[in-house]
Image (cartoon, helix red, strand yellow):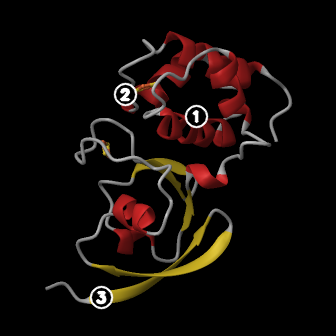
Amino acid sequence: MSTVKQISLTLNGEPKTFETTADETLVDLLRRHGYRGTKTGCYEGACGACTVILDGRAVYGCLLRAFQAHGRDVQTIEGAGSFDDPHPVQRALVDEGAVQCGFCTPGMVLSAKALLDETPHPGSDTIKEHMDGNLCRCTGYEKIRVAVEKVAASTAMP
Ligand code: FES
Ligand code: FES
């Protein structure tokens, strides 16, 4: 049986402490604590449903053990925006009709957010390349690409 250890991290801007085991993935720890916007799909780094932002970079939460987030900064979709105050990418996805079942959407939003936080006005090729690891079974990607490009082209990022 795995030993339980305590980890501390910054989660959506707030200091948090959690108990975890050596084999628990980051996405499982987050979901176990109610951060269920982060989805689980393949558990093998192929779908992007579990995308979170770790120290500013979009990563697959299924490929990280929770203890690897100790001392680091983690953002989940719960910290990206709210119903009343959505992140610009969330708003753009809705405006463009780029959300269908919604399963991929949290990962898409965080992947785009990580890119736009680092590079506010990326070109189309950069967007495509960056979001290559986030799969969507519903939308055909075009509307998602248009939505992210619209945000990238706007001058008023928060
Ligand atoms: S569940 Fe992590 S990449 Fe698919
Ligand atoms: S909207 Fe259904 S998987 Fe993307």
Report crowding for label 2: few under 14, some 14 to 19, many 20 or more residues within 10 A (C-alpha): some
Q: Is mark 2 within 8 Å of ligand 2?
A: yes
Which residue corresponds to mark 2?
A: 135
Measured in 3D between alpha carbons, the distance from the residue under mark 2 to the one under mark 3, in whole angstroms, is 34 Å
Q: Secondary structure at mark 1?
A: helix
Callouts 2 and 3 close, C-beta under 8 Å: no
- Left or right of 140? Residue 24 is left
The amino acid marked with disc number 1 is Ala
> Which quadrant of the figure contains the N terminus?
bottom left
Q: Which residue is mark 1?
A: 112
Q: Classify residue 139 by image quadrant.
A: top left
80 versus 138 height, above or below: below
Amino acid carrying mark 2 in the image: Leu
The residues tagged by marks 1 and 3 sit, at their Cα atoms, a distance apart of 34 Å
* Label 3: how many Cα within 10 Å (few below 14, some 14–19, many 20+): few
Vertical order, 140 against 31 (above or below): above
Q: At 66% from the left edge and 33% from the top edge, which residue is drawn?
A: 90
Secondary structure at badge 3 equals strand
The disc, 1 or 2, on the residue closer to the chain's N-terminal end is 1
Give the image location of residue 68, x and y in percent: 38, 70
Q: Is residue 49 left or right of residue 93?
A: left
- The residue carrying pointer 1 sits among few (fewer than 14), some (14 to 19) or many (20 or more) residues within 10 Å by Cα, namely many
Residue 142, above or below 135: above
